[in-house]
Image (cartoon, rainbow, N blue to C red):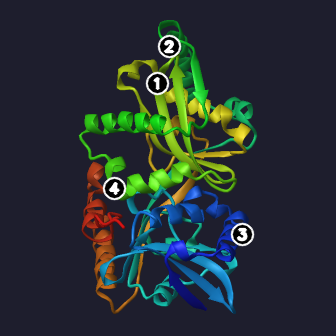
Amino acid sequence: MKAHVIRPQDLDAGHLTQWRAIIDREKTYRSPFYSPEFTCAVAAARSDAYVAIIEDAGHAVGFFPFHRLRGGVAKPIGGPISDYQGPVFSRERAVDPQALLALCGLASYDFNHLPLAIDKFSALSYSRSRSPLVDLSGGYEAYAASQGKSWKSAMKAMRRRWRKTEREIGPIRVTYHDASDDMYARHKAMKNALYDKLRVRSVLDVPWVSDALDTIRKTQTPEFAGVMTTVHAGDRLMAAHFGMRSKTVWHWWFSSYDLAMANYGSGIILINEALRIAHEHGLHIIDFGRGEAEYKTTFSNDATPLCEGSAERTGTLAGALRTGQKALLSAARPLPLGKFESYPRRALARLISGMQLPAQTN
């Protein structure tokens, strides 16, 4: 096998067709994060983005997008905003991780949202998680009929708040996609207000993230699109969500709501209405991304198993650091840390294998 490492902007029509053929065949890659459009949007905002085209007998059998940092360290394309990671290969043509790194001239590759189904890489993981999702393949009514007590209780509360909203503010209306710059700006303002309340830095204001999201928002093709969904009560914007979709999967990404309307349950209304309208747009999965937030456990009826870890080559500094990291985590695992169980992993990730990317733009 051979690898040709190029800038994503240099992918030609044939490469894109081959990439899409793989993600259409393999269920593992149904998320929009595996679409070439996501890689190209990030690459348009950062100069350290590359994609390796893996060829066998002159035919492309896989694609490996990544950020190349110092010392041959590779990070998943999109880094901290990527909810699904890893190389794109037909299952029968998957390459051993160390061999892939060697083909690409890399020392290591870190991941923290990699599906267990990418088994050659997940075998190198040291932590497991899950991405809750809603499977709507039978339609909303079938989904609703199959849900348990917690969902039904949440829907009862939502209907009560819906009536209160319409009585006090105005009729509720939902827009699947609002392409206007003004609506996106209003969504960002609401999201940043939420970040301020939590006293965390807004990822939306990181220059390269902002640029990449703008590109995604303006991309509208049958295979991939940004989706800006809104819920209004009368003329007032209650809640909004910016995500993206592939052919069949809607990824739930950046949601916001008017803090002054928190008591009206606008976030729950937004999610439930998104579930109702997904089928109209050919979307059978709404994926909430990794985590166990209450709304995710309330609405989800399935999940994708994920893992965190790294692939590394021996004889490299990056490889030695990651081998040491795994040894330390293995030693810490039996310790009675209780609620602090995740601290060693998180601390070592910040030092060695985290997803943070340098503050560098094109």
Name the residue that disc number 2 marks: 165
Tell me which numbered mark, 1 or 4, is placed earlier along the sequence.
4
Q: CA distance from mark 3 to mark 4?
A: 32 Å
Q: CA distance from mark 3 to mark 1?
A: 39 Å
Circle 1: residue type: Met
Give the quadrant of residue 278: top right
Residue occupying image coordinates x 69% and y 79%:
92
Residue 135 on image: x %, y %: 66, 44
Q: Nearer the viewer, mark 1 or mark 2?
A: 1
- Between marks 1 and 4, how big is the CA–CA gap? 27 Å
Q: Confirm or deny contact between disc 1 and disc 2 (CB under 8 A).
A: yes
- In this view of the protein, which residue sits in the foreground, 39 or 10? 10
Could you tell me how far apart the alpha carbons at marks 3 and 2 are, in whole angstroms?
46 Å
Residue designated by label 3: 21
> Which residue appears at 67% of the width and 34% of the height?
277
Label 3 amino acid?
A: Ala
- Kindly identify which residue carries mark 4: 207
Looking at the image, is mark 1 or mark 2 earlier in the sequence? 2
Q: Which of the two discs, 3 and 2, labels the residue nearer the N terminus?
A: 3
Q: Nearer the viewer, mark 4 or mark 2?
A: 4
Q: Answer left or right for 126 relative to 196.
A: right
